[in-house]
Amino acid sequence: MEGVAAVDLGAGSASGRAAPQADRWVAVALRTISPALDPNASDEAWAWLYDGRIDTRQALLRFQPCAVSVIHASTRVTWTIRPVIFLPMSHRRETELPACAYDFKPHTSL
């Protein structure tokens, strides 16, 4: 998938250049925390790691957002992965503005 896939963590985010990077980021996070999870949450995490990742990748390739959640005790942790497309910024060299910059006129006050 071309473009960028973003992972929203609620309190933060991460991004990658393609769906596999975002998917991998969540997989690493789940593997990291899984030893500290209760048995049910750990089973949920590993179920996604073994089977759910395939569905996640397929959804991202169709430009559909996905979510992965685990519930540990009374806390739900959710990773939301969604494809986003960014337009590249105009290339700038030092103080040289792109040609289109001169097409805009400043507002004049009355």
Image: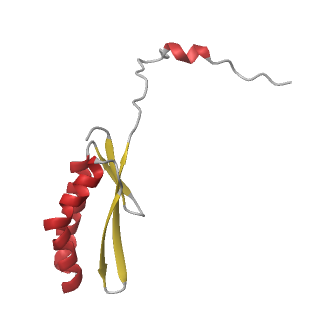
Quadrant containing the N terminus is top left
Q: Which is more toward the observer, 7 or 91?
A: 7
Quadrant containing the C terminus is top right
Count of marks, rendered view: 0
Q: Is residue 3 above or below residue 54?
A: above
Looking at the image, residue 27 sits to the left or right of residue 14; the answer is left
Q: Which is more toward the observer, 3 or 59?
A: 59
Can the viewer see residue 58 in this picture?
yes
Instruction: Give coordinates of residue 57: x percent, y percent.
Output: 23, 54
Tell me what residue is drawn at x 43 percent, y 18 percent.
Answer: 94
Q: In the picture, residue 33 is in which quadrant?
A: bottom left
Looking at the image, residue 20 sits to the left or right of residue 6; the answer is left
Q: Which is more toward the observer, 71 or 1?
A: 1
Looking at the image, residue 108 sits to the left or right of residue 17; the answer is right
Which residue is the extreme one toward the right? 110
Can the viewer see residue 38 in this picture?
no
Instruction: Give coordinates of residue 44: x percent, y percent.
Output: 22, 76
Instruction: Give coordinates of residue 92: x percent, y percent.
Output: 42, 20
Tell me what residue is drawn at x 16 percent, y 66 percent.
Answer: 51
| Scheme by which the image is coloured | secondary structure
Q: In the picture, residue 65 is in which quadrant?
A: bottom left
Q: Is residue 72 above or below residue 94?
A: below
Q: Which is more toward the observer, 97 or 7?
A: 7
Instruction: Give coordinates of residue 20: x percent, y percent.
Output: 21, 49
Looking at the image, residue 39 sits to the left or right of residue 86; the answer is left
